[in-house]
């Protein structure tokens, strides 16, 4: 089924197996976001590259976003930051993933994605449903129909698309639409005024047409990064851009991009969990914390480190929370459907509940409260 959308306030960029939706802000206008995201999407950048583009200005200016990434014959990776909701199917069950109330973002691998809801305050969702095969639009909902085992989207079947007369492109925009360059003109790189871009018409008051495919020579080579499936410590539930926040803070976006281009990355400081009962646990592989932790299924050599804690009242579940470091150095926490939940405390911010079954990035110095006075502080040691 051809992807469809309804007009709204979120910028949506779609090309092939990747969809990125982002809510513009006063600091990050839609035009600036599109200039940043379009080259990354059409060049086939992996999840790490997409998240770097979204987080290039650091956490303070990080917008709300949704990233859907599908590779042929693989599951769909869903990453959500903010109030957006993604309706999907995982292991034969309907799931809804949202980043609302999560400090960083929520991630999960699913078998199929059905619809992406992109809410904004006071927005009406009564516009027509329009087809979207590849390009950039402003949208409130997107039906993507991404599913395991499928390659490129099927040929258009417009039964579910509202009938509407085709929009004739304005004469002044016809020539930019044919050329559709992606890379920035040389004079713009030197700080001079740039020629009208191929997507300038996207921001006209009543024009919501999609963009034509970019010129072949404008697409950059995809960023080479390790695949999530190659890591034996992965539980195949999440894929993250590991260390994106930490590396941006330490190196800056430009230095990080240069090091990745050269195929080298700085060493990541080891993570240590400091428990309120005095235990200190180095995170090497998976760590399971609980009243009587156990691992029922251990694939290959992925043997977790079991950390038991006292819970006189039983507030802490037997196997309460999982922590691990992904392949790029970020600490991930996943509540294992505990009875009383896991709460994350960062600085003076109010505690935030960790969504059950969904991994989230844990910032340095954050404290996980798992009940009965048991806390886990995430720290990084010096090399």
Image: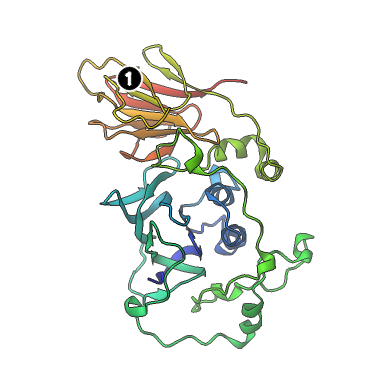
Q: Classify residue 92 as left or right of residue 45.
A: left
Q: At 66% across and 43% down in the image, what residue appears? A: 260
Label 1 neighbour load within 10 Å: few <14, some 14-19, many 20+ = some
User: Which residue is at the far front?
Assistant: 300
Q: Secondary structure at mark 1?
A: strand
Percent x, y for residue 191?
A: 77, 61
**Residue 130 location, quadrant:** bottom left
Percent x, y for residue 148?
A: 38, 56
79 to 139, vertically: above or below: above
Q: At 38% across and 27% down in the image, what residue appears? A: 368
Screen quadrant of the C terminus: top right
**Badge 1 is on which residue?**
374
Percent x, y for residue 265?
A: 65, 36
Screen quadrant of the N terminus: bottom left
**Residue 153 location, quadrant:** bottom left
State the count of labels: 1
Q: Classify residue 28 as left or right of residue 115.
A: right
**Residue 101 location, quadrant:** top left
Q: Classify residue 146 as left or right of residue 198.
A: left
User: Which residue is at the far top?
Assistant: 278
Q: Nearer the viewer, residue 353 or 217?
A: 217
């Amino acid at each position: 089924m051809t992807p469809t959308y309804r007009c709204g306030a979120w910028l949506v960029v779609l090309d092939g197996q990747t969809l990125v939706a982002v809510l513009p802000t006063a600091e990050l206008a839609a035009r600036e976001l599109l200039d940043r995201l379009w080259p990354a999407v059409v060049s086939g950048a992996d999840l790490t590259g997409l998240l770097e583009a979204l987080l290039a200005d650091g956490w303070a200016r990080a917008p709300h976003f949704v990233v859907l990434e599908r590779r042929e014959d693989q599951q769909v990776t869903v990453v959500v930051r903010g109030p957006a909701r993604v309706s999907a199917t995982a292991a034969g069950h309907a799931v809804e993933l949202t980043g609302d109330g999560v400090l960083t973002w929520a991630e999960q691998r699913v078998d199929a994605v059905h619809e992406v809801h992109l809410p904004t305050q006071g927005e009406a969702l009564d516009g027509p449903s329009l087809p979207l095969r590849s390009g950039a639009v402003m949208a409130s909902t997107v039906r993507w129909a991404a599913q395991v085992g499928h390659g490129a989207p099927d040929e258009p079947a417009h039964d579910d698309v509202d009938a509407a007369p085709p929009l004739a492109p304005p004469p002044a925009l016809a020539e930019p639409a044919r050329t559709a360059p992606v890379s920035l003109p040389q004079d713009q790189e030197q700080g001079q005024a740039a020629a009208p871009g191929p997507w300038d018409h996207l921001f006209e008051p009543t024009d919501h047409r999609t963009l034509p495919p970019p010129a072949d020579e404008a697409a950059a080579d995809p960023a080479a990064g390790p695949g999530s499936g190659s890591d034996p410590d992965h539980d195949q539930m999440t894929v993250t851009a590991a260390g994106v926040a930490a590396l941006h803070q330490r190196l800056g976006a430009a230095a990080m991009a240069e090091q990745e281009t050269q195929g080298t990355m700085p060493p990541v400081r080891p993570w240590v969990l400091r428990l309120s009962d005095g235990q200190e646990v180095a995170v090497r592989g998976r760590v399971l914390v609980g009243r009587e932790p156990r691992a029922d299924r251990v694939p290959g050599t992925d043997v977790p480190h079991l950390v038991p804690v006292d819970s006189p009242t039983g507030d802490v579940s037997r196997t309460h929370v999982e922590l691990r470091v992904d392949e790029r150095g970020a600490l991930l926490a996943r509540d294992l459907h505990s009875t009383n939940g896991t709460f994350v405390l960062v600085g003076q911010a109010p505690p935030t509940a960790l969504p059950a079954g969904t991994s989230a990035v844990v910032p340095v110095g954050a404290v996980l409260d798992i009940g009965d006075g048991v806390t886990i502080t995430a720290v990084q040691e010096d090399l």
